[in-house]
Amino acid sequence: MIRDFEYFAPKTLKEALTLLDKYQDEAKVIAGGQSLLILMRQGLVAPKYLIDIKGISELNYIKSDAKEGLKIGALTTHRTVEKSPMMRNGFSVLAEIERNVASIQTRNWGTVGGELCHGDPAEDPAPALITLNATLKMASLKGERTMAVEDFTLDYFETALKPGELLTEIQVPVVPPHTGTAYTKFTVIENDLPTVGAAVSIILGSGDDICQDVRVALSASAPIPMRAKQAEAVLRGKKITDALLKEAGEVASTEAEPLSDIYASEEYRRELIKVLVKRMGKEALARAKKA
Amino acid sequence: MSKYSVIGTRVHRVDGPEKVTGNAKYTFDLVLPGMLYGKVLRSPHPHAKILKIDTRKAKRLIGVKAVITGKDTLGRKQGIWRRFPELCDEEILCREKVRYIGDPVAAVAAIDEDTAEEALDLIEVEYEPLPAVFDPLEAIKEEAPQVHDGVELNINVTRHIEWGDVDEAFKKCDHIREDQYKLCSQAHVCMETHDAVVSYDYGGKMTVWTSTQSSYYIQRLMADMTGLREGDIRVIKPTTGGGFGSKFELDSAQFCAAILSMKLCKPVKIVLNREEEFTATKRRTPMYYFLKLGAKKDGTLLAKEVRVITEGGAYTAMGATALYLTGFFSSFPYKYPNYRFDGYRAYTNTATTSAMRGFGAPQSTFVGESQLDMMAEDLGIDPIEIRRKNGMTPNYEVPGQAYIQSCGLHQCLDKIDAHIKERGKLPPNHGIGVSAYGFMSGGIFNWFDTPYAFSAAIVRINIDGKVDLFTGACEIGQGSDTTLSMICAEELGVKLEDIRIHAADTGICPVDLGAWGSRTTLMNGNAVKMAAADAKRQLLEFAAAKMGPNIVYDFDIKDQWIHLADRPERGISYFDIVKEAIRGKDGETIIGRGHYTPHRKGMISPAYSFGVQAAEVAVDPETGRYKLVNVTTAHESGTVINPVGIEGQLEGAIMMAGGYGYCEDQPMDEGKILNPSIADYKLIRSLDMPETEILEIDTYEPEGPFGAKEAGEGLTNPTAGAIGNAVYKAVGVRINDLPITPEKVLRALKEKQKKSK
């Protein structure tokens, strides 16, 4: 049963921030509601005030800029990202991911910002955004600040958002030349939440096959969407071979902190991390060579 | 030209337009003036004594109209095995003791759902938790807690089936295999959860609208439990969103709504939420299986010994039948000269296990077909060949058990063999597994103790030629309204659109036992055919009198044309004769009656269907993840009434049985089901569905209407076994506990690698 709450539907960011400032912890923000409504129905979340930001059109946009990269308004739906012609030049991985997020109905309504703010480590876009070095813009009545996606989730269902603060924009910097990024997730049934997900982004030097930089990030492998820095170290500065990718997978599997639950045991998740990191490394490498 | 005008044509469902437009009204949609909303309070303990229930606070909540507990009932226990009072063990509203997490202890009626739910929180129940037992192998130990007082070793039911001399036969075998299996639970996951609207009036009459597979069972059981006369209870089944075996027993929504309505003389509606649906309704029976199979070198099967211990859960329900049928179908579809089955159903403090599509046979088919493939491999015989060698044939008697008339198993094997050869050489890590199976066309057993015929129908012909078909058969999504309308139209010689079916309303329809055991097409179909023939005969009498042909001619009706059977051009319009016949009968409408109860057909079923399925999987050996690539089925169901209906049954069955084989399970912690939501309970969905194909087999069942037999549940039997055999073919590992999850496959692959090193 959903407990009674007072409902607000601000039409501007300013109105929303004013409401958030007023009600602070007693308020919960709802965008697409694809995660929150389930928690409310189960009685796990029972806010006194519900601030529905879905109608704030100024937060629903995708902008592409040759210098600054991609800017995605927090209220952009999964489906909009999936279908956007701006998801190219190194950003196409974001559209690929969205294609396998839940069902079309969910993608039509759920928002990318909402998913990030939900703070579930078993989510899709966060690892790819981390490997693309993305940052998040947050706003409150006091002003704005930005933060790396990597630092945004603090623990299970806990983010760095402060009371009164709203996520407004996802910023993905221009992807350097010779970069390849790939993400995949393991699911038992298609388009489910990941049992484990892995994103790898590789930047090659111009004219050689040496890995200039690399980022590896995992979902459902730790309390937060985590960056596998030790696995990155295996690859950075080297000419990437299959053996090296296998090693990176093994290292990622060791540094991850997966749990056992009804979907998979900890051991199985570690096995999956090995395989997924290796495979995505290989895919990212192939893409980098083509880029 | 086909000898039939309606049978065998591709027909859209008669209830299709209402359903696809969203206009069909389910119990869930019903609203009556003054209706109240009920909710059920359930036990949080797997096993506990109820010391005290204080409802005072809940009653004081504004908007609450009544709160009931077991004390407001007659204190009777019910069950569907009515011939055996000791197996009627479920109170529904517990008075002294709760036996699983979800057992109902109280219910509330209020002005809206939220108020009712709020009131539940105000009911104070004092429990004394008792030691509980969850696993059937633990439950049958001396020291295990007793789930029901006086039931020794918690053994609820035992079943024994035997023929031949098994021990002697094993001595003659060249090769014997012994294997063990563990079979998981499965939830029905009906689109419509259990629900009911019950209205009891000041005149002492009760009307129940409910999502059910048997309006008659609900009427009878409700009479048992409320003390009302059967005739004072009218049960109406509106459009129903699925049953799969979960909806032919009296449930908490129906019973609690009835008791509340009797207190208030107001309609009360109870709709179970999805969590209740997962935790507090019945489910598929988990089983431990111990199999011993003996064969000659040439693959001739000489003996089979089967021991099964099933997890009963808290109550008997239909679990006794699941136990018996898993034992009977463990011998299917092969001719074992010597066979022995010993089955035990143990009570546990878990949600009750009962009927679910296939009813014990998906379990027996998975274990039997897995073991048979291993036997074939041990002996160096092709899997199809060993099935050919031992497969049942027409006019075969299962010794002392059943008589099989039509049987197309060998045609099915031939077609599947050809299909596999056609697929040719498969890519690496692909494998095709086969699984052969059979199923019944309705049960003969009458543990319910009905004094009525198993099926009945009434056909009424109106002045405009329109036909009203009245039957107790329950359309739950399986297509029976369409099938029965087709049978009626064919027999009467009219068009499908001439038929209007009125079904599953005990107030106007004759009794039918309901939609379970794949009984409707054969049993109710026979009753409908007989009723239509009865009405037709009355028309033909008038036609004969009017046309006055030579006495040697027979009459028939086809496509609304009444004619001489051998001179179709000599005839008269059906519509004209209907008008004349009614006039001739002093204005009485024409009514035909039909009924059917199987006689002299053994103890189990009047007819059996057979089939063979081939499943192709593609395994990712690094993750254990596999995909169902193709599932091809040769299913012989006698005459096909509606090919579209069979295709729907097949696709639904692959989704359900594929899930059973691949991912569906109900993990528990101390009796608590851990995945009671559709997000957490993994079901195969459209994106996971393989390509499916149905291979036509031509058989005719003499006992069925127009030669038809089962085409519903049987299709659920083969898939898990076919998947298991396919995974083995693909990557060489066997998983003996369902579901065959990617994680288990990978673990087995790792173990295999270790061993080969």
Image (spheres, rainbow, N blue to C red):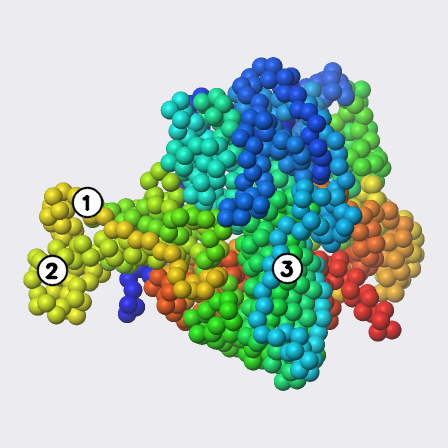
Identity, as a three-letter code, of the amino acid under mark 1: Thr
Quarter in which the C terminus of chain A is drawn: bottom right
Q: Nearer the viewer, residue A286 or B165?
A: B165
Q: Is residue B298 above or below residue A71?
A: below
Label 3 Cα neighbours within 10 Å, binned few <14 / some 14-19 / many ≥20: many
CA gap, disc 2 and disc 3: 59 Å
The residue at the point 64 percent across, 41 percent down is B279
Q: How many marks?
A: 3
Q: Is residue B679 above or below residue A9?
A: below
Q: Which residue is mark 2?
A: B544
The nearer-to-camera label among 3 and 1 is 3
**Drawn side of residue B112 relative to residue B672, left or right:** left
Identity, as a three-letter code, of the amino acid under mark 3: Gly
Say if mark 1 contacts mark 2, CB within 8 Å.
Answer: no
Say if mark 2 contacts mark 3, CB within 8 Å.
Answer: no
Residue B589 circle label: 1
Q: Earlier in the sequence, mark 1 or mark 2?
A: 2
Q: Quadrant of residue A42?
A: top right
SS type, badge 3: strand
The answer to whether dots 3 and 1 both sit on one chain is: yes
Q: Earlier in the sequence, mark 2 or mark 3?
A: 3
Q: Position of residue A25 (x, y in %)?
A: 77, 21
Q: Which residue is mark 3?
A: B343
Is any atom of residue B215 visible in this view? yes
CA gap, disc 1 and disc 2: 19 Å
Q: Position of residue B283 (x, y in %)?
A: 61, 48
